Amino acid sequence: MTDRYAVIGNPIEQSKSPLIHTAFAEVTGQDLAYTKLLAPLGGFAAAVDAFRAAGGKGMNVTAPFKMDAFAYATELAPSAQMAGAVNALKFVGDTVVAENFDGVGLVRDVVNNLKCPLQGRRVLILGAGGATRGALLPLLSQGPAELVIVNRTVAKAQALQSLAQQHHTGAVPIRALGYDELAGQTFDVVFNATSASLTAELPPLPATVFAPACLAYELAYGKGLTPFLKLAQQAGAGHLADGVGMLAEQAAEAFAWWRGVRPDTAAVIQKLNVPLV
Ligand code: ATR
């Protein structure tokens, strides 16, 4: 029998997850159907209950339901606990297991696809919202020389710094700064995990932060050359990337978790890639 999966959100029309998972199912020969599920605001639990009652095996969760999924789960993986949000669910009898694969997807894209090892590198991450929170432990697990979190509201960067320090078992120095404290500092990898690109805004970032061979990585996907990437390009950053690979990699992690087989992501990344111009 065909196993059923879905991505749930509101809005949901924009989601690429059905395309990605259907492609993965084809190449791995898995018998599954993956659809979009629009739930009304306040209607997350009822929609998931109905999907499970109809035999649904798992779900991806997107905005605005990542916290609802956190509350709905009966077992939270450490990644979901650390991120404070859930992006994948697996239904096993009465158990609802919850994961968050965004952070590990980001790291896999950078290290495996973009061939940019993070070990020993100076890493800067812009923003102190949910995207940064989910990325912290996966980034730290790579053993960078340091991890600096910069945010307009410095207190939020400091809160994430303490959270990361509590959970990180290694010895990577973690700092929290305001943008005006970045003068004179350079980084090998700079991640934009703010929501600024969604409104074509530019965080107040000095162009001097990009080291010559630097990777500038925009976590948002499909926005072309965002103001952040343009700044990095003008500053001579060696490599620019957006979040298409992160999107594909987090999906592959979920697929492997559900189905026990890990699909290759290259074809999906190529298909979804939007040129950075
Ligand atoms: P997400 O879950 O996508 O991370 P979020 O939790 O709303 O979204 O966090 C958005 C992040 O983008 C915050 O760190 C925010 O900075 P503040 O905490 O100071 O508000 C950051 N952000 C949004 N617009 C920005 C801009 N124009 N410049 C710099 N940072 C911005």
Image: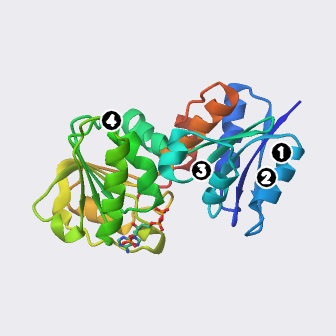
Callout 1 secondary element: helix
Task: Tell me if label 2 and label 4 are in contact, CB under 8 Å.
Answer: no
Kind of residue at badge 1 = Arg
In the structure shown, which secondary structural element does the residue marked by tag 2 occupy? helix
Residue drawn 40% across the image and 64% down it:
194
* Residue located at (66% from left, 25% from top): 260
Write down the quadrant of residue 12 in the picture.
bottom right
Q: Point out the frontmost of discs 1 and 4.
A: 4
| Lower position in the chain sequence, tag 2 or tag 3 | 2
Query: Mark 2 and mark 1 in contact (Cβ < 8 Å)?
Result: yes
Return the x and y of residue 210 as percentages of the image width and height: 20, 56
Using residue 192 as the reference point, say whether residue 270 is left or right of it. Answer: right
Q: Which residue is mark 1?
A: 52
Judging depth in this view, the residue of 244 and 99 nearest the camera is 99
Query: Between 210 and 256, which is closer to the camera in this rendering?
Result: 256
- Number of the front mark, 4 or 3: 4
Q: Residue at x 49, y 41 (%)?
A: 105
Q: Residue furthest toward the left?
A: 184
- Which residue shows up at 55% across the image and 35% down it? 265
Amino acid marked by disc 3: Val
- Dot 4 and dot 3 residues touching (CB under 8 Å): no
The answer to which quarter of the image holds residue 172 is top left
Type of amino acid under label 2: Val
